[in-house]
Image (tube, rainbow, N blue to C red):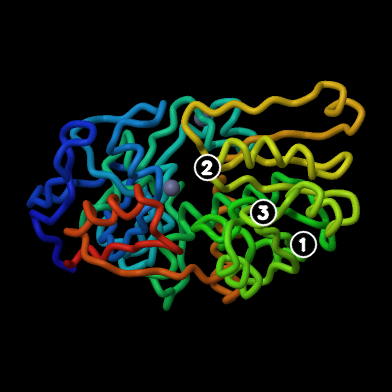
């Protein structure tokens, strides 16, 4: 396989500055890394935050964003042993972690203090060739539709892990706030595939039909509902066993404490800027409610999330555009106009 010396990439040099579509060198993999020919990359909301510098995470400038890259292994460092040239591979948000700290040892590598993050501290997947740590890179079976699989690498893993974090058993109710969005629509499908009963919460009749078509048993429209909490409590006969907050609405997060069931778990996933929620200590103690945060997932979560996708149990509606069109996609993301996921084709 011949590897070119230069490639196309989207580079920005300052926060909110021009997104330059230009020719740069193809990187060389370090001893522990794969060189991946990225064919498709999903565009995630946090790519927009990274570009704007709107997120309290370390970011190295100049930077190539993107952390949902799907492609093929074209080269590898001398210490890599369990990959072959031509293998299909996913480059995800967590590019590498130290594997030796307390968190890594306990399967919480996503909170490793020495984590290297794709599209933040490590040049990302908005380029034709990117490097990825061979241990963290995700394996896709032969024949995987790479364009459709790309969004699983951040959005899919994130909601799957969040559902695991809610600690439910099959047959229990999960309420998903922001159910029609990019994360929400995947969450509904994963939840159903995992055997949970889903009540979706979002705004508008159309979104309700969409959410039900994905497998939600019930829908609460916050735009027309007189009392969202009361409705969820009625549908679930006493509150949802688990709640996934994937929207970026602080008030929706606050409200979820009113419809979580006694002894249930509220999971926070969406990231509204500088948000806080308040809880009554009395309620938290007497109802023994758990509030947890959840961000992406570890290697096992990744493999499991991809397995659900490969068995056809979750589908992410995607729209494919050229890599050169990233700026327009960011505009649409900012305006909240995207249903499903935009995926860029790095050859255009
Ligand atoms: Zn992401
Ligand atoms: Zn670590």
Q: Nearer the viewer, mark 2 or mark 1?
A: 2
Could you say where residue 232 lies in the image, as x and y percent from the top left? 79, 53
Could you say where residue 1 lies in the image, as x and y percent from the top left? 19, 68
Q: Which residue is mark 1?
A: 196
- Which element carries disc 1, helix, strand or loop? loop
Distance between mark 1 and mark 3 Cα atoms? 11 Å
Q: Which residue is mark 3?
A: 176
Q: Write down the quadrant of residue 310 in the picture.
A: bottom right
- Which element carries disc 3, helix, strand or loop? strand
Distance between mark 2 and mark 1 Cα atoms? 23 Å
First of labels 3, 2 by sequence position = 3
Q: Residues within 10 Å of mark 2 (few under 14, many from 20)?
A: some
Residue 248 is tagged as: 2
Q: Residues within 10 Å of mark 3 (few under 14, many from 20)?
A: many
Could you say where residue 268 lies in the image, as x and y percent from the top left? 63, 39
Could you say where residue 128 lies in the image, as x and y percent from the top left? 21, 58
Where 315 falls versus 182 (above or below)?
A: below
Where 136 falls versus 42 (above or below)?
A: above
């Amino acid at each position: 396989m011949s590897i070119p010396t230069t490639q196309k990439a989207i580079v920005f040099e300052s926060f909110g500055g021009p997104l330059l579509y230009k020719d740069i060198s193809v990187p060389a993999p370090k001893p522990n890394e794969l060189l991946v020919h990225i064919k498709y990359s999903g565009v995630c909301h946090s790519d927009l935050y990274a570009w704007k510098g709107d997120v309290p995470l370390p970011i190295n400038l100049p930077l190539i964003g993107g952390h949902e890259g799907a492609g093929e292994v074209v080269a590898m460092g001398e210490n890599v042993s369990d990959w072959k040239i031509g293998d299909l591979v996913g480059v995800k948000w967590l590019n590498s972690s130290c594997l030796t700290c307390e968190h890594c040892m306990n399967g919480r590598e996503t909170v490793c203090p020495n984590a290297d993050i794709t599209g933040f501290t490590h040049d990302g997947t908005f380029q034709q060739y990117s490097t990825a740590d061979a241990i963290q890179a995700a394996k896709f079976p032969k024949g995987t539709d790479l364009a459709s699989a790309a969004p699983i690498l951040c959005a899919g893993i994130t909601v799957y892990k969040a559902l695991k974090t809610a600690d439910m058993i099959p047959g229990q109710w999960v309420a998903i706030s922001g159910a029609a969005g990019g994360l929400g629509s995947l969450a509904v499908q994963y939840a159903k595939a995992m055997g949970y009963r889903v009540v979706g919460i979002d705004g508008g009749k159309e979104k309700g039909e969409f959410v039900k078509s994905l497998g939600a048993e019930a829908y609460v429209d916050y735009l027309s509902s007189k009392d969202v909490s009361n409705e969820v409590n009625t549908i679930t006969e006493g509150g949802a066993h688990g709640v996934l907050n994937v929207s970026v609405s602080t008030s929706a997060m606050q409200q979820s404490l009113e419809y979580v069931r006694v002894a249930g778990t509220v999971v926070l996933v969406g990231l509204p800027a500088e948000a806080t929620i308040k809880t009554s200590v009395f309620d938290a103690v007497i109802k023994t409610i758990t509030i947890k945060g959840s961000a992406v997932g570890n290697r096992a979560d990744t493999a499991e999330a991809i397995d659900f996708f490969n068995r056809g149990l979750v589908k992410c509606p995607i729209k494919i555009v050229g890599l050169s069109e990233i700026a327009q996609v960011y505009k649409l993301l900012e305006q909240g106009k995207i249903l499903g996921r935009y995926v860029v084709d790095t050859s255009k």
